[in-house]
Amino acid sequence: MSALTNLLALADSRLPTGGHVHSGGVEEAVSSGLVVDTGTLETFLRRRIRTQALVTASIAAAVHRGALDPADADRETDARTPAPAARAASRAQGRGLLRLARRVWPAQSWESVGQHPHLPVVAGLTGRAAGLTPEHTALSLVYTTMTGSATAAQRLLALDPADVAAITFGCAQLCETTAAQAAAGLCDLSDPLLDTLAQRHAGRDRPLFVS
């Protein structure tokens, strides 16, 4: 399998890593009246790309390059993820990706990530195992951060799938520039609103999504 095909596979929403049960805060944004239509959804997605996606992708790219070992990357992710609920969501998705990576690349050593790794830590090692460049590893994480929230909003608001797809195409350039920035070095931009939404969602009674 070529590196490009691996990139497409890792960016596929059907990838069995458990990401489909996470909305990336958009469920709470919908419940709070912050995301109500395609316009407000696009604003939310662009904000999430520029902040959370940038930070997590920068950690993944650093792991891919070998600039951070998994233990240090785990600590750096914790330090850049203020909300406990967001940290829990990251580790849940990290476990899901680790389970798949072990199945697809069994010859690789995965012990260094531990039993409950953050998503960007596993994503960095997975990108390396898949033969991607650090830039493409970052792009994969930025892209799936966007599409996970976009798909969740489509379900929650019963939006036209074509309208949501048009938004994601419109965010393509932002995804690429964000991935390039992430690959250039560690980023530490935080977003208090997204952290607040993540933590508030954790206390919601019977939500549709885990996060």
Image: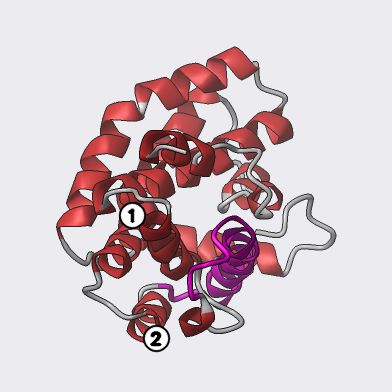
Question: Residue 184 at x, y = what percent?
Answer: 15, 56
Residue beneath the point at 60% across and 31% down: 36
Q: Which residues are magenta?
A: 81-109
Dividing the picture into quarters, in which one does residue 167 lie? top left
Q: Is residue 66 above or below residue 134?
A: below
Q: Secondary structure at mark 1?
A: helix
Residues at marks 1 and 2, CA–CA distance in whole angstroms: 23 Å
Return the residue nearer the eye: 122 or 171: 122
Question: Residue 17 at x, y = what percent?
Answer: 65, 54
Q: Earlier in the sequence, mark 1 or mark 2?
A: 1
Label drawn at residue 71 = 2
- List the residue tagged with mark 1: 51
Q: Is residue 78 visible?
A: yes
Residue beneath the point at 78% across and 55% down: 207
Residue beneath the point at 60% across and 38% down: 13
Question: Residue 185 at x, y = what percent?
Answer: 17, 63
